[in-house]
Image: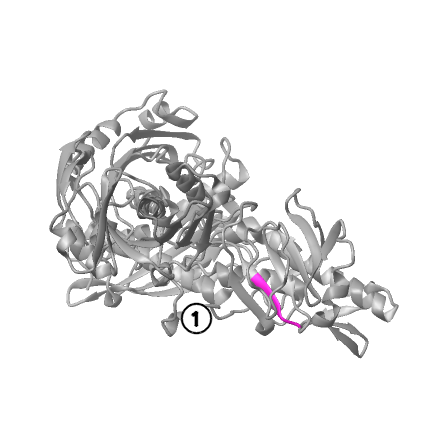
Amino acid sequence: MTLIKTKIDRRSFLKSSALAGGGLMIGFAWGCNPAEATKEAPTAWFDINSFITIADNGDVTILSPNPEIGQNVKTSMPMIVAEELDVNWADVIVKQAPLSTAFQRQVAGGSQSIRSSWNILRTAGASARHLLLEAAAQEWGVSASSLRTENGYVYNGSKKLSYGHLASKAAQFEIPEEVPLKDPKDFKIIGQSKTNVDLDQIVTGKPLFGIDTRKEGMVYAAAVRPPAFGTELESFDDSEARKVNGVLDVVQFGDKIAVVATNTWAAIKGKKAIKANWKKAGNLESTTDHDKELSRLLDVASKESLKREDGNISQAFKSADGVLERVYEAPFLPHNTMEPMNFFANVTDSKVEMEGPIQTPQWTQSNVANALGRKTEEISIAMTRMGGGFGRRLYGDFAVEAAQISDKIRKPVQLIFTREDDMTAGTYRPASKYKFRAAYKNGQVVGYHLTGAGIQMGDSTRSNWFPAGGIENYRVDSHNVRSNITTGAWRAPITNFLAMAEQAFFDELAGEMGVDAVQLRLDILERAKNNPVGSIDYEPEKMIGVIKLAAEKGGWNNGNASIAKGFSAYYSHNTYVAEVAHMSQVNGQPKLDKVTVAVDCGIVVNPEAAINQVQGGVVDGIGHAMYGDFAFVDGRPQADNFDKFRLIRMKEAPDVEVHFVPGTNHPTGLGEPSLPPAGGALANAIAKATGRRVYKIPFVQQDIALG
């Protein structure tokens, strides 16, 4: 049993109070506002960020604070609360919370939702359970320590009282300074697979996603945006657009034009009828120019670019038995979520009502306030489920646009992007290049130099991650190239390509040195574990653990001439993942049959959902490594739909076998960590199967095909 302070900080545990009808509400700062949470609506709400409501009929409603983007937090976060509350999961009602102005982290990003809220969620449930025990103890005239709870009841020997019966009485007790938390061995809900709470609505097509939003009096809008980065609106003719049946209005907002209509199709049709003239307003950049600049910077090592230096890198390379140098490159990539960008806004003199799929509701609220010149407290944001995000919905530009359009027309409006809008007016994964140099002597890596260069990436490296600490002479440089092309987070930012390049390089290095690829990684990690050079931001022991588990489960040392295996391991988002790609030959073509994955992410809250997250990350990583390509010519994107942008197909997706390292450590990230090592495992399996090394994404452009 662990004792935990109920007041984690001054906002973590704010109030408890009796509800109308005799219910109990308890608030914690895990990020949500009051909403309808009981069968009989309460008459008063409190200034809290999150809450449990217990009705006198025994209903328990738990509001899920963080945006649901497919990572399953709408199920997993309430599971944690319900575990410590000791309630029957079948009796729990889960609802999505809207944005609150007082919260700790109401964001879907960085794979941090569970990790950052673990203790707060547990404290929420445990504190409620404590109050219920105190109420029961008073009613029976016994000590609370003599009682126990189970499935929504307090037991005194054979006698029992329901949480519903006790709720109003429990509200009269003071919240203690600290409460005991369960020992993980006693968990009944955490660690058990629970069905997605939205599953029924998803499979039956009920309104759930942002694009499903319908409001009284709502109109629809589509926007015309600059066709190239570096251009701006000069003039436009909307006469033909206004003739389209259903078009209500055409308005300009900033450098964009909105066509407002009675339905989406009319808005899109009207948009296509707009005749706009654009003028140059900045550099019209092309991918070929970016490539040249990134390549130039890979040969530059300066004080400005230096991120870390250990030992004497120059001497290590001079005295080495051998040196390997390789360059890897990756293009821009769009996000291509299944549900295109959309948002609802209704701007009035007194308030701004907004609803839609957003990963960063608070930041978006602030941006809307700035754009409209309004106070943030006038702006409410209700969050819908998202049909994918992968980082694109971190940037609420589409929500700001919806608010600007509504402000112009003073009507409730839903702005919807077409697929072409999504791909040509997006926020892209930056193009990048990496140069790796390694020196080896007497069977060990004695020198390592990584140079990264990216388009608006900031630091394109992770200088304190593997292999930092395990190589005596070690240097990392990073260069940033400015651009007017909007770039940003794309699932597992930076590491989504850095990991592929790094792990492919280490595999080839092992071949050059004549050592086993897995053993080479383990040797470096043992040095980092036992006698690290400088500081490191990862735990070598955990990385060693997943490497050994993946090698075991993937049969790394089991010889089978018909199966080529590629290995990869990476640490990101506080989680350790190792993968073995299994590749066979079908009609002379390599075929990726299976990927075996080992993961150390601490306690797994919902195993079935966790497996799905890992599988999705692996398939996503493999698909974009094989096929992802995107280019610009004179600032203009060269692909605008799926006829020009290749995604992985169902028949190309491998089986993904997932193994979790058992343990009781607090949960870490899971939505992103399985993606970074996937491309490296694939590249290394291709090398084993074909004898060819791949240095550039997409692999398919290097005459590599999968059967």
Which residue, as the protein is rendered here, is positioned at the far bottom? 158
**For residue 364, side relative to residue 630 (left or right):** right
Q: What stretch is highlighted in magenta?
A: 58-62
Q: Which image quarter holds the C terminus?
A: bottom left
Place of residue 307 in the rendered image (x, y in percent of width and height, measured from the top left): 40, 28
- Residue 292: image quadrant is top left
| Residue tagged 1 | 199
Disc 1 residue type (three-letter): Leu
Q: Is mark 1 on a helix, strand or loop?
A: helix
Which residue, as the protein is rendered here, is positioned at the far top? 303
Asked whether residue 508 appears in the rendered view, the answer is yes
- Residue 560: image quadrant is bottom left
Q: Which image quarter holds the N terminus?
A: bottom right
Residue under the point 27% across and 53% down: 221
In front here: 158 or 590? 158
**For residue 318, side relative to residue 93 (left or right):** left
